Amino acid sequence: MSHYYSENQDVPHSRKEVSFRFLDTLITLTTDSGVFSKDHLDPGSELLLRHIVKQFNQQSFCDAGCGYGAIGITVKKIFPESSVTMFDINQRAVDTAVENCKLNKVQCEVIQSDGFDKISDSFDMVAINPPIRAGKTVIYRLFEEIEKHTKKDGILLVVIRKQHGAQSAQNKLTEIFGNCDMIDRSMGYWILKSTKH
């Protein structure tokens, strides 16, 4: 079965516009079928954004598995001096994210990539709302690649539902980074934070 964490989408296009306000900043985005949460900003991503903004040092940021670009574009709008890289395996998501950068008049690097295959940079902060449907093997590989692409003293922020394996994700991140704190737990979501030492 096709799902959003796949390279090419064969589902018919069904484009729509979604808007949300975050910290008094209005974000309007085009979405499409075959991308994650096409009808609205999902609550997990909104919670993740709140923690990104609290902890961001305004340098380099990576939105891993960016979908149509909601997180990366919001970060760039709020922190215009930062450099933002977004990637997704899904070509339709990447095309939509590029379009949304233009729509919101922000300059971000948007790359179609299976994990970090096509990315050589390292980042001060990486954030991910993991592709649960892709399975733990894929998610844990992404965590390992993120660690390699996080600068010293840089941080990873993850949002994951408790019933989707938050505890095992925390254990895996502790194994990879040597640390992982649950910094928030609300609405059934956990926010996990690991720091690269």
Image: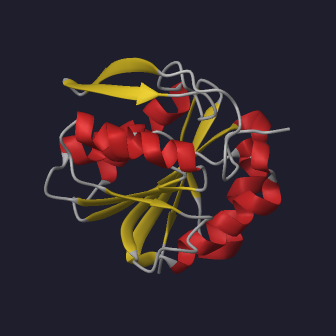
Residue 150 percent across, percent down from the top left: 45, 74
Q: In the image, what residue occupies the spot 71% across and 58% down?
A: 139
Which is more toward the observer, 47 or 183?
A: 47
In-image side of 80 versus 112 (left or right): left
Q: Is residue 41 visible?
A: yes
Q: In the image, what residue occupies the spot 81% across and 62% down?
A: 137
Give residue 164's quadrant in the image: top right
Q: Is residue 183 visible?
A: no
Residue 127 percent across, percent down from the top left: 47, 54
Q: Is residue 94 above or below residue 164?
A: below
Give residue 115's quadrant in the image: bottom right
Q: Is residue 24 above or below residue 179?
A: above
Q: Quadrant of the N terminus?
A: top right
In-image side of 78 versus 39 (left or right): left
Give residue 123's quadrant in the image: bottom left
Residue 19 percent across, percent down from the top left: 34, 19
Residue 67 percent across, percent down from the top left: 52, 42
Q: Is residue 39 above or below residue 191?
A: above
